[in-house]
Protein backbone atom coordinates (compact mmCIF):
# COMPACT_ATOMS: atom_id res chain seq x y z
CA UNK A 1 0.00 0.00 0.00
CA UNK A 2 1.27 3.44 -0.97
CA UNK A 3 1.00 6.54 1.18
CA UNK A 4 1.62 10.29 1.00
CA UNK A 5 0.67 13.16 3.22
CA UNK A 6 -0.98 15.06 0.36
CA UNK A 7 -2.59 13.28 -2.60
CA UNK A 8 -3.45 15.62 -5.47
CA UNK A 9 -6.10 14.27 -7.84
CA UNK A 10 -5.48 15.52 -11.38
CA UNK A 11 -2.34 16.58 -13.25
CA UNK A 12 -3.78 19.59 -15.06
CA UNK A 13 -2.66 23.11 -14.27
CA UNK A 14 -4.56 23.18 -10.95
CA UNK A 15 -2.97 19.99 -9.64
CA UNK A 16 0.49 20.63 -11.09
CA UNK A 17 0.69 24.21 -9.80
CA UNK A 18 -0.51 23.08 -6.38
CA UNK A 19 2.21 20.39 -6.27
CA UNK A 20 4.83 22.94 -7.32
CA UNK A 21 3.87 25.65 -4.85
CA UNK A 22 3.26 23.15 -2.04
CA UNK A 23 6.73 21.61 -2.33
CA UNK A 24 8.22 25.08 -2.74
CA UNK A 25 6.61 25.96 0.61
CA UNK A 26 8.27 22.97 2.27
CA UNK A 27 5.96 19.94 1.89
CA UNK A 28 7.91 16.84 0.93
CA UNK A 29 5.29 14.10 0.85
CA UNK A 30 3.18 14.93 -2.19
CA UNK A 31 1.74 12.51 -4.72
CA UNK A 32 -0.10 13.61 -7.88
CA UNK A 33 -2.39 10.98 -9.40
CA UNK A 34 -3.67 11.31 -12.96
CA UNK A 35 -6.14 8.99 -14.65
CA UNK A 36 -4.70 9.53 -18.15
CA UNK A 37 -1.41 8.29 -19.66
CA UNK A 38 0.08 11.77 -19.38
CA UNK A 39 -0.56 15.12 -17.65
CA UNK A 40 -2.40 17.97 -19.38
CA UNK A 41 -4.61 15.92 -21.71
CA UNK A 42 -7.84 17.74 -20.82
CA UNK A 43 -8.58 21.47 -20.35
CA UNK A 44 -4.95 22.31 -19.59
CA UNK A 45 -3.91 21.01 -23.01
CA UNK A 46 -6.89 22.31 -25.00
CA UNK A 47 -7.00 26.06 -24.27
CA UNK A 48 -5.97 29.26 -26.03
CA UNK A 49 -2.87 29.85 -23.83
CA UNK A 50 -3.64 33.53 -23.30
CA UNK A 51 -2.59 35.38 -20.19
CA UNK A 52 -5.46 37.84 -19.67
CA UNK A 53 -5.42 40.02 -16.58
CA UNK A 54 -8.38 42.34 -17.16
CA UNK A 55 -11.51 40.56 -15.98
CA UNK A 56 -14.59 41.88 -14.19
CA UNK A 57 -14.30 39.80 -11.02
CA UNK A 58 -11.78 41.73 -8.86
CA UNK A 59 -10.76 38.64 -6.88
CA UNK A 60 -10.08 36.53 -9.96
CA UNK A 61 -8.31 39.59 -11.43
CA UNK A 62 -5.99 39.66 -8.38
CA UNK A 63 -5.07 36.00 -8.93
CA UNK A 64 -4.61 36.78 -12.63
CA UNK A 65 -2.10 39.56 -11.91
CA UNK A 66 -0.17 37.31 -9.53
CA UNK A 67 -0.23 34.40 -11.99
CA UNK A 68 0.82 36.63 -14.90
CA UNK A 69 3.73 38.04 -12.89
CA UNK A 70 4.92 34.47 -12.24
CA UNK A 71 4.78 33.59 -15.95
CA UNK A 72 6.67 36.77 -16.91
CA UNK A 73 9.42 35.98 -14.39
CA UNK A 74 9.69 32.21 -14.17
CA UNK A 75 11.89 31.43 -11.14
CA UNK A 76 15.56 31.36 -12.19
CA UNK A 77 16.10 27.87 -10.75
CA UNK A 78 13.62 26.29 -13.20
CA UNK A 79 15.63 23.94 -15.45
CA UNK A 80 13.79 24.72 -18.67
CA UNK A 81 12.55 28.07 -20.00
CA UNK A 82 8.83 28.77 -20.50
CA UNK A 83 8.23 30.82 -23.64
CA UNK A 84 6.01 33.86 -23.05
CA UNK A 85 5.16 36.10 -26.02
CA UNK A 86 4.44 39.43 -24.36
CA UNK A 87 2.45 40.86 -27.26
CA UNK A 88 -0.21 42.35 -24.99
CA UNK A 89 -3.97 42.23 -25.44
CA UNK A 90 -6.69 44.41 -26.92
CA UNK A 91 -10.13 43.93 -25.41
CA UNK A 92 -12.63 45.63 -27.71
CA UNK A 93 -15.91 47.13 -26.54
CA UNK A 94 -19.08 48.67 -27.89
CA UNK A 95 -22.00 50.19 -25.96
CA UNK A 96 -22.57 48.52 -22.57
CA UNK A 97 -19.55 46.24 -23.12
CA UNK A 98 -17.34 49.31 -23.57
CA UNK A 99 -18.75 50.84 -20.38
CA UNK A 100 -18.08 47.64 -18.50
CA UNK A 101 -14.52 47.49 -19.89
CA UNK A 102 -13.90 51.07 -18.76
CA UNK A 103 -15.09 50.18 -15.24
CA UNK A 104 -12.84 47.09 -15.18
CA UNK A 105 -9.96 49.21 -16.46
CA UNK A 106 -10.39 51.80 -13.69
CA UNK A 107 -10.47 49.05 -11.04
CA UNK A 108 -7.46 47.25 -12.56
CA UNK A 109 -5.40 50.44 -12.70
CA UNK A 110 -6.21 51.16 -9.06
CA UNK A 111 -4.87 47.67 -8.34
CA UNK A 112 -1.67 48.48 -10.21
CA UNK A 113 -2.23 46.92 -13.65
CA UNK A 114 -0.55 48.72 -16.52
CA UNK A 115 -3.38 49.23 -19.02
CA UNK A 116 -5.05 52.06 -20.94
CA UNK A 117 -8.08 52.87 -23.07
CA UNK A 118 -7.35 53.11 -26.79
CA UNK A 119 -9.58 54.82 -29.35
CA UNK A 120 -10.78 52.76 -32.31
CA UNK A 121 -8.23 54.39 -34.69
CA UNK A 122 -5.35 53.43 -32.40
CA UNK A 123 -6.56 49.82 -32.26
CA UNK A 124 -6.92 49.78 -36.02
CA UNK A 125 -3.39 51.11 -36.49
CA UNK A 126 -2.08 48.35 -34.27
CA UNK A 127 -4.12 45.52 -35.85
CA UNK A 128 -5.19 46.65 -39.34
CA UNK A 129 -7.35 43.58 -39.87
CA UNK A 130 -9.87 45.23 -37.49
CA UNK A 131 -10.97 47.43 -40.42
CA UNK A 132 -14.78 47.33 -40.61
CA UNK A 133 -15.07 45.72 -37.15
CA UNK A 134 -17.84 46.91 -34.84
CA UNK A 135 -16.23 48.49 -31.77
CA UNK A 136 -15.75 51.95 -30.28
CA UNK A 137 -12.37 51.38 -28.62
CA UNK A 138 -10.65 48.97 -26.35
CA UNK A 139 -8.36 48.29 -23.43
CA UNK A 140 -4.69 47.80 -24.24
CA UNK A 141 -2.87 45.69 -21.66
CA UNK A 142 0.82 45.43 -22.62
CA UNK A 143 1.76 42.82 -20.00
CA UNK A 144 -0.71 40.21 -21.30
CA UNK A 145 0.41 37.64 -23.85
CA UNK A 146 0.57 34.01 -24.85
CA UNK A 147 2.40 31.36 -22.87
CA UNK A 148 3.72 27.94 -23.82
CA UNK A 149 1.18 26.10 -21.65
CA UNK A 150 2.76 22.67 -22.08
CA UNK A 151 6.12 24.02 -20.88
CA UNK A 152 4.44 25.76 -17.93
CA UNK A 153 2.62 22.57 -16.89
CA UNK A 154 5.75 20.44 -17.27
CA UNK A 155 7.70 23.08 -15.35
CA UNK A 156 5.33 22.93 -12.38
CA UNK A 157 5.57 19.14 -12.34
CA UNK A 158 9.33 19.00 -12.84
CA UNK A 159 9.98 21.47 -10.02
CA UNK A 160 7.61 19.59 -7.71
CA UNK A 161 9.41 16.30 -8.50
CA UNK A 162 12.83 17.90 -7.88
CA UNK A 163 11.55 18.66 -4.38
CA UNK A 164 10.35 15.12 -3.77
CA UNK A 165 6.81 14.99 -5.19
CA UNK A 166 5.77 11.94 -7.22
CA UNK A 167 3.44 11.60 -10.21
CA UNK A 168 1.45 8.45 -10.95
CA UNK A 169 -0.26 8.36 -14.35
CA UNK A 170 -2.97 5.85 -15.36
CA UNK A 171 -4.07 6.07 -11.77
CA UNK A 172 -7.78 6.87 -11.53
CA UNK A 173 -9.34 7.77 -8.20
CA UNK A 174 -12.34 5.49 -7.76
CA UNK A 175 -13.28 6.13 -4.13
CA UNK A 176 -12.08 7.28 -0.74
CA UNK A 177 -11.52 5.90 2.72
CA UNK A 178 -13.41 8.31 4.93
CA UNK A 179 -13.65 7.63 8.67
CA UNK A 180 -15.55 9.87 11.07
CA UNK A 181 -15.99 12.32 8.22
CA UNK A 182 -12.19 12.55 7.73
CA UNK A 183 -10.23 11.46 4.62
CA UNK A 184 -7.76 8.71 5.45
CA UNK A 185 -7.06 7.31 2.00
CA UNK A 186 -7.74 7.46 -1.70
CA UNK A 187 -8.85 4.29 -3.51
CA UNK A 188 -7.38 4.20 -7.00
CA UNK A 189 -7.09 1.87 -9.99
CA UNK A 190 -3.57 1.14 -8.66
CA UNK A 191 -4.69 0.40 -5.10
CA UNK A 192 -5.24 2.24 -1.84
CA UNK A 193 -3.11 5.28 -1.06
CA UNK A 194 -3.14 6.41 2.57
CA UNK A 195 -3.12 10.20 2.99
CA UNK A 196 -3.84 13.06 5.35
CA UNK A 197 -5.29 15.34 2.71
CA UNK A 198 -6.88 14.70 -0.67
CA UNK A 199 -6.83 17.60 -3.10
CA UNK A 200 -9.60 17.71 -5.67
CA UNK A 201 -7.96 19.19 -8.79
CA UNK A 202 -9.99 16.98 -11.13
CA UNK A 203 -11.20 19.74 -13.49
CA UNK A 204 -14.46 18.71 -15.19
CA UNK A 205 -14.63 15.65 -12.90
CA UNK A 206 -14.38 17.69 -9.68
CA UNK A 207 -18.07 17.22 -8.85
CA UNK A 208 -17.86 13.48 -9.49
CA UNK A 209 -14.70 13.09 -7.38
CA UNK A 210 -16.36 15.02 -4.53
CA UNK A 211 -19.43 12.78 -4.65
CA UNK A 212 -17.17 9.71 -4.33
CA UNK A 213 -15.74 11.21 -1.13
CA UNK A 214 -19.18 12.17 0.24
CA UNK A 215 -18.05 15.80 0.14
CA UNK A 216 -20.33 18.80 -0.48
CA UNK A 217 -22.46 18.70 -3.62
CA UNK A 218 -21.48 21.97 -5.29
CA UNK A 219 -23.13 23.45 -8.39
CA UNK A 220 -20.30 22.95 -10.92
CA UNK A 221 -20.71 22.32 -14.63
CA UNK A 222 -18.30 21.76 -17.54
CA UNK A 223 -18.93 24.13 -20.48
CA UNK A 224 -17.59 23.14 -23.89
CA UNK A 225 -15.82 25.74 -26.01
CA UNK A 226 -14.28 25.36 -29.49
CA UNK A 227 -11.02 26.66 -30.86
CA UNK A 228 -10.20 26.99 -34.56
CA UNK A 229 -6.86 27.44 -36.30
CA UNK A 230 -6.70 28.94 -39.78
CA UNK A 231 -4.48 27.87 -42.63
CA UNK A 232 -1.38 30.03 -43.37
CA UNK A 233 -2.13 33.77 -43.75
CA UNK A 234 0.75 35.89 -45.03
CA UNK A 235 -0.74 39.14 -43.68
CA UNK A 236 -0.77 38.04 -40.03
CA UNK A 237 1.95 39.66 -37.91
CA UNK A 238 3.36 37.47 -35.17
CA UNK A 239 3.64 40.45 -32.83
CA UNK A 240 -0.09 41.27 -32.84
CA UNK A 241 -1.72 41.17 -29.43
CA UNK A 242 -4.59 38.80 -28.80
CA UNK A 243 -7.83 40.58 -29.66
CA UNK A 244 -10.99 39.81 -27.71
CA UNK A 245 -14.22 41.47 -28.86
CA UNK A 246 -16.09 41.36 -25.57
CA UNK A 247 -19.26 42.93 -26.99
CA UNK A 248 -19.76 40.02 -29.39
CA UNK A 249 -17.68 37.37 -27.59
CA UNK A 250 -15.22 36.31 -30.25
CA UNK A 251 -11.42 36.34 -30.10
CA UNK A 252 -8.35 35.77 -32.27
CA UNK A 253 -4.60 35.80 -31.92
CA UNK A 254 -1.57 34.96 -34.05
CA UNK A 255 -0.82 31.24 -34.28
CA UNK A 256 1.98 31.34 -36.86
CA UNK A 257 1.61 30.94 -39.79
CA UNK A 258 -2.08 31.80 -39.28
CA UNK A 259 -4.60 32.72 -36.60
CA UNK A 260 -6.23 30.95 -33.67
CA UNK A 261 -9.87 31.93 -33.10
CA UNK A 262 -12.84 31.13 -30.89
CA UNK A 263 -16.51 32.08 -31.14
CA UNK A 264 -16.73 31.73 -27.33
CA UNK A 265 -19.49 29.13 -27.63
CA UNK A 266 -20.85 27.59 -24.43
CA UNK A 267 -22.71 24.31 -23.96
CA UNK A 268 -22.92 22.20 -20.84
CA UNK A 269 -21.64 18.68 -21.56
CA UNK A 270 -20.56 15.74 -19.37
CA UNK A 271 -16.91 15.45 -18.23
CA UNK A 272 -14.70 13.72 -20.81
CA UNK A 273 -13.14 14.41 -24.18
CA UNK A 274 -15.80 16.63 -25.77
CA UNK A 275 -17.02 15.80 -29.27
CA UNK A 276 -16.95 18.77 -31.64
CA UNK A 277 -20.22 20.30 -32.79
CA UNK A 278 -20.46 21.72 -36.33
CA UNK A 279 -22.71 24.50 -34.97
CA UNK A 280 -19.57 26.11 -33.49
CA UNK A 281 -17.88 26.70 -36.86
CA UNK A 282 -21.13 28.18 -38.14
CA UNK A 283 -21.25 30.49 -35.11
CA UNK A 284 -17.65 31.54 -35.79
CA UNK A 285 -18.50 32.26 -39.44
CA UNK A 286 -21.49 34.40 -38.43
CA UNK A 287 -19.53 36.37 -35.83
CA UNK A 288 -16.64 37.04 -38.22
CA UNK A 289 -18.94 38.13 -41.01
CA UNK A 290 -20.90 40.50 -38.77
CA UNK A 291 -18.26 41.82 -36.41
CA UNK A 292 -14.78 41.15 -37.90
CA UNK A 293 -15.49 41.23 -41.66
CA UNK A 294 -11.84 41.20 -42.80
CA UNK A 295 -11.57 37.71 -41.24
CA UNK A 296 -14.75 36.37 -42.82
CA UNK A 297 -13.00 34.53 -45.67
CA UNK A 298 -10.27 32.68 -43.81
CA UNK A 299 -10.17 28.90 -44.12
CA UNK A 300 -9.99 26.70 -41.05
CA UNK A 301 -7.37 23.96 -41.03
CA UNK A 302 -7.96 22.38 -37.62
CA UNK A 303 -10.16 22.64 -34.56
CA UNK A 304 -10.82 21.13 -31.17
CA UNK A 305 -13.07 21.58 -28.17
CA UNK A 306 -12.25 21.77 -24.47
CA UNK A 307 -14.08 22.18 -21.19
CA UNK A 308 -14.22 25.19 -18.90
CA UNK A 309 -15.62 24.11 -15.56
CA UNK A 310 -17.60 26.83 -13.80
CA UNK A 311 -19.29 27.13 -10.42
CA UNK A 312 -22.80 28.62 -10.57
CA UNK A 313 -21.44 32.00 -9.35
CA UNK A 314 -18.44 31.77 -11.74
CA UNK A 315 -16.01 32.08 -8.82
CA UNK A 316 -13.22 29.54 -8.40
CA UNK A 317 -13.68 26.89 -5.70
CA UNK A 318 -10.51 26.75 -3.60
CA UNK A 319 -10.75 25.69 0.01
CA UNK A 320 -11.56 23.02 2.57
CA UNK A 321 -14.71 20.98 2.18
CA UNK A 322 -17.26 21.58 4.94
CA UNK A 323 -18.46 17.96 5.07
CA UNK A 324 -15.32 15.86 4.77
CA UNK A 325 -12.26 16.93 6.72
CA UNK A 326 -8.95 16.82 4.88
CA UNK A 327 -10.61 17.27 1.46
CA UNK A 328 -9.43 20.43 -0.32
CA UNK A 329 -11.06 21.79 -3.50
CA UNK A 330 -8.94 23.40 -6.24
CA UNK A 331 -11.52 23.51 -8.98
CA UNK A 332 -13.84 25.53 -11.22
CA UNK A 333 -11.08 27.66 -12.76
CA UNK A 334 -13.38 28.33 -15.71
CA UNK A 335 -11.64 30.22 -18.49
CA UNK A 336 -8.83 31.59 -16.31
CA UNK A 337 -6.85 28.52 -15.23
CA UNK A 338 -3.77 29.24 -17.35
CA UNK A 339 -3.45 32.88 -16.27
CA UNK A 340 -4.06 32.24 -12.59
CA UNK A 341 -2.43 28.83 -12.12
CA UNK A 342 0.63 29.92 -10.12
CA UNK A 343 -1.53 32.02 -7.78
CA UNK A 344 -4.12 29.25 -7.43
CA UNK A 345 -1.36 26.78 -6.52
CA UNK A 346 0.05 29.22 -4.00
CA UNK A 347 -3.34 29.76 -2.29
CA UNK A 348 -3.96 26.01 -2.16
CA UNK A 349 -0.49 25.45 -0.68
CA UNK A 350 -1.08 28.04 2.05
CA UNK A 351 -4.38 26.41 2.98
CA UNK A 352 -2.81 22.94 3.03
CA UNK A 353 0.05 24.06 5.26
CA UNK A 354 -2.24 25.96 7.62
CA UNK A 355 -0.60 29.27 6.75
CA UNK A 356 -2.43 32.51 7.21
CA UNK A 357 -4.90 33.42 4.48
CA UNK A 358 -6.37 36.88 5.12
CA UNK A 359 -9.59 36.32 3.23
CA UNK A 360 -10.58 33.55 0.85
CA UNK A 361 -13.37 34.59 -1.54
CA UNK A 362 -13.14 31.18 -3.23
CA UNK A 363 -14.00 29.16 -0.13
CA UNK A 364 -16.66 26.49 -0.95
CA UNK A 365 -18.29 27.43 2.39
CA UNK A 366 -20.08 30.19 0.46
CA UNK A 367 -22.47 27.47 -0.73
CA UNK A 368 -23.20 26.32 2.84
CA UNK A 369 -22.37 22.78 3.94
C1 LIG B 1 -11.29 26.31 -25.22
C2 LIG B 1 -10.65 26.80 -23.96
C3 LIG B 1 -9.85 27.94 -23.99
C4 LIG B 1 -9.25 28.40 -22.82
N1 LIG B 1 -8.39 29.45 -22.91
C5 LIG B 1 -7.79 29.91 -21.80
C6 LIG B 1 -6.89 31.00 -21.88
O1 LIG B 1 -6.59 31.48 -22.96
N2 LIG B 1 -6.34 31.48 -20.73
C7 LIG B 1 -6.65 30.95 -19.51
O2 LIG B 1 -6.18 31.45 -18.49
N3 LIG B 1 -7.46 29.86 -19.40
C8 LIG B 1 -8.04 29.33 -20.51
N4 LIG B 1 -8.86 28.26 -20.45
C9 LIG B 1 -9.13 27.67 -19.12
C10 LIG B 1 -8.06 26.69 -18.67
O3 LIG B 1 -7.67 25.84 -19.71
C11 LIG B 1 -8.62 25.87 -17.49
O4 LIG B 1 -9.10 26.76 -16.48
C12 LIG B 1 -7.56 24.98 -16.85
O5 LIG B 1 -6.90 24.22 -17.81
C13 LIG B 1 -8.21 24.06 -15.80
O6 LIG B 1 -7.21 23.23 -15.28
P1 LIG B 1 -7.58 22.03 -14.31
O7 LIG B 1 -6.30 21.48 -13.83
O8 LIG B 1 -8.59 22.49 -13.32
O9 LIG B 1 -8.37 20.98 -15.24
P2 LIG B 1 -7.78 19.86 -16.24
O10 LIG B 1 -6.70 20.41 -17.08
O11 LIG B 1 -8.96 19.29 -16.96
O12 LIG B 1 -7.14 18.79 -15.28
C14 LIG B 1 -7.90 17.93 -14.47
C15 LIG B 1 -7.20 16.58 -14.49
O13 LIG B 1 -7.80 15.72 -13.53
C16 LIG B 1 -7.76 14.41 -14.05
N5 LIG B 1 -8.76 13.60 -13.35
C17 LIG B 1 -10.10 13.77 -13.35
N6 LIG B 1 -10.72 12.84 -12.62
C18 LIG B 1 -9.73 12.03 -12.13
C19 LIG B 1 -9.75 10.87 -11.30
N7 LIG B 1 -10.89 10.34 -10.84
N8 LIG B 1 -8.56 10.28 -11.00
C20 LIG B 1 -7.38 10.81 -11.46
N9 LIG B 1 -7.33 11.89 -12.26
C21 LIG B 1 -8.49 12.51 -12.58
C22 LIG B 1 -8.09 14.61 -15.53
O14 LIG B 1 -7.70 13.51 -16.31
C23 LIG B 1 -7.32 15.88 -15.84
O15 LIG B 1 -6.02 15.62 -16.35
C24 LIG B 1 -9.48 27.75 -21.59
C25 LIG B 1 -10.26 26.60 -21.56
C26 LIG B 1 -10.84 26.13 -22.73
C27 LIG B 1 -11.65 24.87 -22.70
Image (tube, helix red, strand yellow):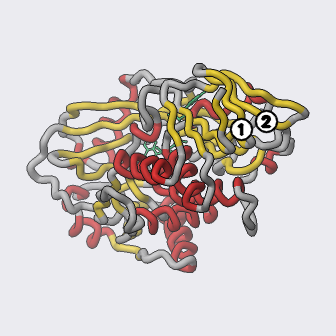
Q: Residue at x 57, y 55 (%)?
A: 23
Q: Residues within 10 Å of mark 2 (few under 14, many from 20)?
A: many
Give the left or right position of residue 44, taking residue 235 as reference: right
Residue underneath mark 2: 183
Q: Residue at x 31, y 43 (%)?
A: 261
Residue 157 x %, y %? 46, 47
Q: Residue at x 79, y 36 (%)?
A: 183
Residue 82 in sight: no
Q: Which mark is residue 195?
A: 1
Give the left or right position of residue 241, taking residue 316 as reference: left
Name the residue nearer the viewer: 268 or 211. Answer: 211
Residue 196 x %, y %? 74, 42
Give the left or right position of residue 57, taking residue 113 as reference: right
Residue 188, placed above or below residue 106: above
Q: Indicate which label's residue lies in the foreground, 1 or 2.
A: 1
Name the residue nearer the viewer: 143 or 300. Answer: 143
Q: Mark 2 and mark 1 in contact (Cβ < 8 Å)? A: yes
> Residue 117's image quarter?
bottom left
Residue 336, placed above or below residue 299: below
Q: Residue at x 64, y 50 (%)?
A: 316
Name the residue nearer the viewer: 130 or 252. Answer: 252
Q: Ligand 1 closer than 8 Å to the CB at disc 1?
A: no
Residue 128 x %, y %? 19, 61
Farthest residue, direction left: 234
Task: Measure the alpha-carbon separation of dots 1 and 2.
Answer: 7 Å
Split into 4 quadrants, where in the image is the C terminus?
Answer: top right
Q: Residues within 10 Å of mark 1 (few under 14, many from 20)?
A: many
> Residue 78's image quarter?
bottom left
Residue 226, placed above or below residue 331: above
Amino acid sequence: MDSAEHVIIGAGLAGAATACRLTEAGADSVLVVEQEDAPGIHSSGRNAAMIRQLVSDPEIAALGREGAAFVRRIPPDWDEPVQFDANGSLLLGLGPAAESLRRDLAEARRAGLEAEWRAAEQCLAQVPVLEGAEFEGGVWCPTDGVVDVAALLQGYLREARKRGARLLTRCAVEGFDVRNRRVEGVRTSQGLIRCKTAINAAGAWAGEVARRAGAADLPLAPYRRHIFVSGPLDWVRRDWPFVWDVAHEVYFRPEPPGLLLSPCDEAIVPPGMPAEDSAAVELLGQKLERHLPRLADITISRSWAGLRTLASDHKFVIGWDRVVEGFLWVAALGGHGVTTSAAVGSLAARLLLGRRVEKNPFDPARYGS
